[in-house]
Image: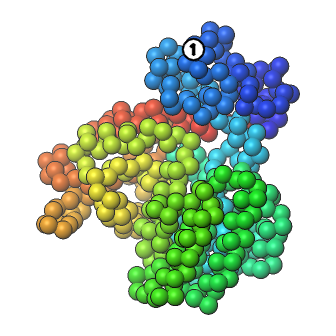
Amino acid sequence: MTELRNKLLKDEFKEKEDIKKFPIIALLDISEEEYKLLKEMNLETIDDLASKWDQHYEKIIKKIPKERVNSWIAASRLLLVGDTDKITTGAKIVMVGTDNAGKTSLSIALKHRGALSLLFQKLYALTPTRGLLRSKIEVFGMDVHIHELGGQNVYREDYLNNPQQYFLGTDIVIYVVDVQAKDRFEESFEYLKQITNVTNALKLKVPWKIFFHKSDPEYEIDDKTTEIFSSIIEYMTNNSPYFNSAKDLFRTSVKIRSSILGAFSHIFRDISLIQHGVIDASEQAAKQLKADFFGLYDFRSNVCFAQYSEQEELEDLAHTAYYEAIETIVNMREPFLRIRRYTLDKDVNEIFILRDLRFGGDRYIMAMFTQDEEMARSLDQDAIQEIIEERLKDWIEFRGYATFPLD
């Protein structure tokens, strides 16, 4: 935190307490005149800037260069991140559950590129996680740190007795339930209650996600499984104010990798520092491209970090089509184009288009569904790039500030 203060604050504020109440002029590169303009918009403190910037953004950038405004927003958010003992300047996800629930397999399947048979070879070689296992995924310039807590009894006691060591600074808690381990349902449910009590005691305002994992296509959910699912949902609804049963439940399976991709993409979009405006920008891009679905995927992590869809079922289909395509793209060196046709209900023909793009030297993949044959035939790389850069320009620019350098 000291290093962060030295980089971002004027000298007279580096040793003071309660950063939230600091006036915005405490930031190193802001002038008196700029501070006055912000005060006129009721933005006076670091906390105001970090939490209310999106309400005033359009007005501010008419008077102050956008690059400067973006850097102040990012600096204020990073200072508050440090002030709440967050461990990293990116996002932190804690994944917890009993041993053999499939936590490690989720992380591996998310990042895997190539044939399903190669994925299974990796999974067969897995051994139980010992204690805490950390991994990192970069999603559109933001480091997402996944902390997997080994589920063996010998480790659980430490998590419950020293929760601040593992849960402080967390952005999301994912609890993984093995739907095929019927003999361990009661144990898993009890562990979930203990973890919930711990996070509530720490007064962490942390969103919860429940993964009903190993929901393989051939596996039939019986009455006992349905009953425990209902009990878990009811318990979480009553005991966690940051759990929403309508959007925080996911059925996942390594045999349906799109289920994992969809779940993590939803989560990463939720915790992004720069989620404001992304939905509108994605919708604008979709309409300009005459797309019923539009999505941008991070090539390294497979995460769909921006999307818009006219129909919910097209999201699942797009994620499935994306995974099927990247099975053949292991070491992509040249620009590529993939086109495939799908016939949906009522004989609606959707054309699926996959193209690679570059922003700031990084590689991304655009996916879209369209019924417009002419658009599909005439689509060219430069036109796509130009449309996306135009519509998502502010977001792309803000990416660099959202990961303010600490080195």
Residue type, mark 1 in image: Glu
Most foreground residue, 345 or 302? 345
Q: Position of residue 259 (x, y in %)?
A: 44, 68
Q: Residue furthest bottom?
A: 183
**Vertical relation: 16 (above or below) 181:** above
Give neighbour class at mark 1: few <14, some 14-19, many 20+ (Cα, 10 Å).
few
**Vertical relation: 70 (above or below) 320:** above
Which residue: 62% across, 39% down? 403
Q: Residue furthest front?
A: 238
Q: Position of residue 130 (x, y in %)?
A: 76, 74
Count of numbered circles in the view: 1
Q: Can you see residue 382?
A: no
**Vertical relation: 95 (above or below) 49:** below
Q: Which image quarter: residue 350? A: bottom left
Q: Which image quarter: residue 69? A: top right
Q: Residue furthest top?
A: 33
Q: Position of residue 109 (x, y in %)?
A: 52, 69
Q: Position of residue 234 (x, y in %)?
A: 55, 70
Task: Name the colouring of the figure.
Answer: rainbow
- Residue under label 1: 40
Q: Can you see residue 18?
A: yes
Most foreground residue, 43 or 351? 43
Q: Quadrant of the C terminus?
A: top right
Q: Quadrant of the N terminus?
A: top right
Considering the numbered disc 1 on the image, is that residue within a helix, a strand or a loop? helix
Residue 164 vs residue 294: left or right?
right
Residue 127 vs residue 131: left or right?
left
Q: Which image quarter: residue 354? A: bottom left
Which residue: 68% across, 22% down? 24
Which residue: 57% across, 14% down? 40
Most foreground residue, 164 or 255? 164
Which residue: 19% across, 50% down? 376
